[in-house]
Amino acid sequence: MRTTCVWMMAAFAVLMAGTALADDEAGESLYLHYCSSCHGESGKGDGPLAGVLQLKPADLTQLAKKGGGELAFLDLLHSIDGRSRVRGHGETGMPVWGEVFRAPKDAPVGEQLQGAGKLLLITFYVQSLQEK
C-alpha cells in the first residue's frame, strides 16, 4: 500500500511540474548518466559498451514501433527499475539501476520520491526518443 502511495505521489509531482520537466534536461541528463553507455546517446543501442556485450542493447527509439505504435510506458518503467525481466540485463531487469533507484521500504518518503522521480524522468525521456 505504501509503495503504491509513493508511486502515485511521484507521478502526481511529475505531472504537476508539467511536461517540460519530464521532457527536458533532467530526463536527458539521467538517461546519459545511467543508460547511454549501453544504449547510446541517441538510444539506438550503439553505446560505447555495446560492442563488448554478449547481447546487443535494445534500440530504444523503436520500442513504440515494436509495440504496434504505442509505447507501453509502465512496461518500460518496470524494465528500467528491474521488476520486468529483460533478457540482456541478467536475472531480473537492469543489473544495477533498480537497486539504485529503489529506496528501502523504511526510508523517508522524500527519499522514496526522489528515486521514483528519477525513474519517471528517464522513462519520459525514452518516450521522447521514439521514432515515428
Image: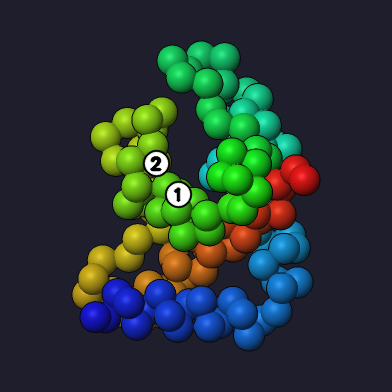
Looking at the rendered image, the quarter that the N terminus falls into is bottom left
Q: Nearer the viewer, residue 111 or 36?
A: 36
Please give the residue where the numbered disc 2 appears in the rendered image: 94
Describe residue 89's horizontal placement relative to residue 76 as left or right.
left
At 59% from the left and 53% from the top, the residue drawn is: 71
* Residue 7 percent coordinates (x, y): 40, 75
* Residue 118 percent coordinates (x, y): 52, 62
Q: Identify the residue at the far front of this view.
A: 68
* Residue 125 percent coordinates (x, y): 66, 55
Mark 2 residue crowding within 10 angstroms, few (<14) / some (14–19) / many (20+): many
Which amino acid type is shown beneath numbered disc 2?
A: Met
Mark 1 residue crowding within 10 angstroms, few (<14) / some (14–19) / many (20+): many
Looking at the rendered image, the quarter that the C terminus falls into is top right
Compared to residue 88, the image places residue 65 above or below, namely: below
Is residue 126 at all visible to an observer of this figure? no
Quadrant in which residue 113 is drawn? bottom left
For mark 2, give the secondary structure. Answer: loop
Give the Cα separation between the discs numbered 2 and 1. 6 Å
Please give the residue where the numbered disc 1 appears in the rendered image: 80
Q: Nearer the viewer, residue 75 or 17?
A: 75
Which amino acid type is shown beneath numbered disc 1?
A: Ile
Proximity of marks 2 and 1: CB atoms separated by less than 8 Å? yes
